[in-house]
Amino acid sequence: MATISQFYRDKEVPEADVDGNLVTATETWHLILDSVASPIAARALIGALVSGNGFGWMVVGVDSHPDDSAIFSTGFNVSRLSNNTVQFLVTTNLTNEIQDINNSRKAIDAEPVYDYQEVDTLIEVDVDPLTGKAIAASNGQPYFPKLQRKGTETRIVISRNELRFDPTFAKNYRDHLNKDTLTIDGRPYPPRTILLESWTGTSAIDTDDSEYYQVKYQALYDPNEHKIELIDAALGPDINGNNPKVNGTNNVWKLIAGVFKGKAAQDDPADFETNSFNLHDEVNMNNLRL
């Protein structure tokens, strides 16, 4: 990903238009990146600059002009300089009208919206949650197919405006769990409890004719780390080649470390082993704006 090598204001001082108390002007900046990038990517780099940055760039509606503390930027446009892919011209619009400043920030600086939804799920059940015994026939053999029950999870939908959306970047995070503790809407969620189901973006135009994206994240919260736990049981043979049969027919038998358990264990619904499995890979999500 490209980064900013140079970013500086044009030496030529722009002329301001004065209409009563209203002052408007435009100012040109020169942007040079360290590698090839699109104008959208260049705009995103500028938009990520914070107040007090080392380039002297005026964050829209936040930083005043060095020559007049009443003048602020209301937005900017980015265009390539000729055919050079690393050099850009940046034109920023200036005014002393507070209403114009507020209007220019209405979209991109809008507060995110958090929507908490209930999601119905089906969960395979191997163990009676009250007794702790395997859900099995009277001879201890587990039922196949497995029993299922209704479950409910919480889906968090985050809607916010951002300067860019890259579907190839988003693909690296979809269908993954948070590798580290993740904070959403001020709440910490432990590792592997948030599944990023969806990350989409829709392009839009701001009041200053600049492009931004209406971005939506969907995250599914599961305090059990989105794992599935199953009784260790299977049709024969086991890892030693043993294949118990009843009346010449294969059945589902309980295992321990790949070996069939003895008859007493097979007949006892309380004597069983379980295996826990992860269904999703994990990734560090702390750089996402959730």
Image: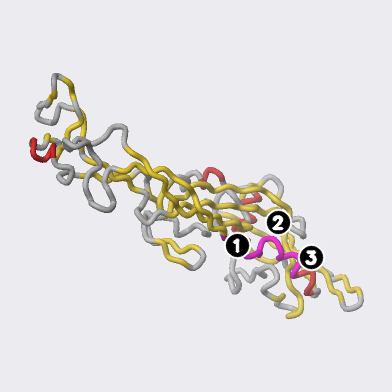
In the rendered image, the vertical position of residue 235 relative to residue 156, given as above or below: above
The residue that mark 2 highlights is 89
x 63%, y 71%: residue: 56
Which of the two residues, 65 or 142, is positioned nearer the viewer here? Answer: 142
Q: Whole-Å distance between the Cαs marked 2 and 3? A: 12 Å
| Amino acid at the residue labelled 3 | Thr
x, y percentage for residue 242?
A: 10, 27
The residue that mark 3 highlights is 26
Q: Whole-Å distance between the Cαs marked 1 and 2? A: 31 Å
x, y percentage for residue 156?
A: 51, 56
Camera-near label (1 vs 2) is 1
Q: Whole-Å distance between the Cαs marked 3 and 1? A: 30 Å
Q: Mark 3 or mark 1, which has the lower sequence index?
A: 3
In the rendered image, the vertical position of residue 97 relative to residue 254, given as above or below: below
x 86%, y 75%: residue: 22
Q: Please, what secondary structure does the residue beneath circle 3 have? A: strand
Within 10 Å of disc 3 (Cα), the crowding (few <14, some 14-19, many 20+) is some
| Amino acid at the residue labelled 2 | Leu
Res. 27 visible in picture: no
Specify whether residue 109 is painted magenta: yes
Q: Please, what secondary structure does the residue beneath circle 1 have? A: loop
Res. 18 mark: none
Residue 266 is left or right of residue 131, and the answer is left
Q: Residue furthest bottom?
A: 69
Which of the two residues, 236 or 134, is positioned nearer the viewer here? Answer: 134
| Amino acid at the residue labelled 1 | Pro
The residue that mark 1 highlights is 112
Camera-near label (3 vs 1) is 1
